[in-house]
C-alpha cells in the first residue's frame, strides 16, 4: 500500500456492508489502522518475499477516519455499501490534514468501528476510538497490507494502475508510449519516494539538478533519463 508525505488515497479502498443495527438508532462509522506486529520489513527481490528487517519504529500519533456520513440512522447504514475511498494514508508524523499516519515497511490491519451515537461523545480524529458497550470493532485478515513509498513488485504496479480510477494519467501515458506505464520508472518520482523514505525534503532545481535542503546539493544516477536532468545524473 503506497503512502506519501502529502497523503495518498488508500487503494484498494475498504468497502463494507453492515446488518443487524437498530434502524431508528443513530450510529457513527469510523476506521482506524493498527500494526499487525512489532516488526519492520524489507522486500527481498531475488526471492520476491517480504522478510523481517528489525523491530518496528516508534508508535505514531493515533488517527481515526470518521465516515463523512456520520452520524446516520441504522436504516441508512444498512441499505448502502459503506466505502472508505476518501481515506488517505501518510508517513508524515507532523500531518495536520487528518490523514492516517503510518510507518513505511510495516504491516497494518484496518478496523471498522460501529459506534452508537450516545457512546460517541469522545470520538475524535486524533484520539483512539472509545471502547465499551455500544462500540463494536470489526477486522478482516484479508485486508492486512504492507506500507511502501514505492511499489516493490512490477505486477502489483501494473495491477493497481489498471484498476485504480485515480491512475488514468499512468494508463494514458502507457498507451501513448506503447509500453507499460510504471510510476517507479520515473526518476523524479523515485527520488521523491526515496526522500520520503529517508524523511528529508528534496526540490528539483530549474537546471534539472536535485538539491538537498539539509546540506549540500547532490545528483543521483538514472541512465534511462534524457535531457538536462539525465546529463546531470550521468556525470
Image (tube, helix red, strand yellow):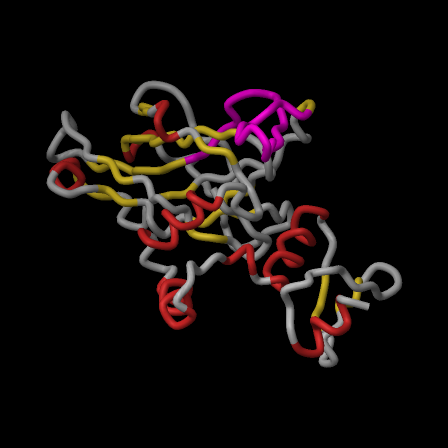
Give the side of residue 181 with respect to residue 229, left or right.
left
Q: Is residue 116 magenta?
A: no
Q: Main secondary structure of the magenta part?
A: strand
Whole-percent x, y for residue 135 in the image: 33, 25
Whole-percent x, y for residue 162 in the image: 33, 54
Which one is in front, 200 or 159? Answer: 159
Q: Is residue 38 magenta?
A: yes
Q: In the rendered view, would you say 49 is above or below 153?
A: above
Which one is in front, 178 or 86? Answer: 178
- Residue 212 appears in which quarter of the rendering? bottom right
Determine the residue located farthest toward the right in the rendered image: 216
Residue found 18% across the figure and 39% down from its top: 77
Q: Is residue 185 visible?
A: yes
Whole-percent x, y for residue 44 in the image: 60, 31
Residue found 37% across the figure and 19% down from its top: 132
Give the side of residue 9 with respect to residue 185, left or right.
left
Image label count:
0
Give the side of residue 167 with respect to residue 61, left or right.
left
**Quadrant that contains the C terminus:** bottom right
Q: In the rendered view, would you say 141 is above or below 8?
A: above
Q: Is residue 139 visible?
A: no
Give the side of residue 21 with respect to residue 34, left or right.
left
Whole-percent x, y for residue 38 in the image: 61, 21
Which one is in front, 131 or 160? Answer: 160
Which one is in front, 66 or 81? Answer: 81
Residue found 49% across the figure and 30% down from its top: 108
Per the rendered image, the range of residues in magenta is 32-53
Amino acid at each position: 500500500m503506497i503512502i506519501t508525505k502529502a497523503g495518498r488515497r488508500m487503494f484498494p479502498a475498504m468497502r463494507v456492508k453492515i446488518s443487524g443495527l437498530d434502524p431508528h438508532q443513530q450510529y457513527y462509522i469510523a476506521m482506524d489502522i493498527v500494526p499487525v506486529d512489532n516488526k519492520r520489513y524489507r522486500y527481498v527481490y531475488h526471492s520476491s518475499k517480504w522478510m523481517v528487517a528489525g523491530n518496528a519504529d516508534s508508535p505514531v500519533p493515533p488517527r481515526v477516519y470518521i465516515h463523512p456520513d456520520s452520524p446516520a440512522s441504522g436504516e441508512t447504514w444498512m441499505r448502502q455499501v459503506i466505502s472508505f475511498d476518501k481515506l488517505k494514508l501518510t508517513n508524515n508524523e507532523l500531518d495536520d490534514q487528518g490523514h492516517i499516519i503510518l510507518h513505511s515497511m510495516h504491516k497494518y490491519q484496518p478496523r471498522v468501528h460501529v459506534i452508537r451515537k450516545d457512546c460517541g461523545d469522545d470520538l475524535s480524529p486524533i484520539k483512539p476510538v472509545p471502547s465499551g458497550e455500544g462500540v463494536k470493532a470489526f477486522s478482516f485478515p484479508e485486508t492486512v497490507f504492507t506500507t511502501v513509498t514505492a511499489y516493490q513488485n512490477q505486477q502489483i504496479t501494473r495491477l493497481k494502475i489498471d484498476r485504480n480510477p485515480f491512475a488514468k494519467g499512468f494508463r494514458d501515458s502507457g498507451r501513448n508510449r506503447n509500453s507499460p506505464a510504471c510510476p517507479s520508472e520515473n526518476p523524479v518520482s523515485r527520488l521523491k519516494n526515496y526522500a520520503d523514505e529517508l524523511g528529508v525534503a528534496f526540490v528539483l532545481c530549474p537546471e534539472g539538478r536535485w538539491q538537498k535542503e539539509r546540506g549540500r546539493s547532490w545528483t543521483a544516477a538514472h541512465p534511462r533519463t534524457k535531457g538536462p536532468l539525465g546529463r546531470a545524473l550521468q556525470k
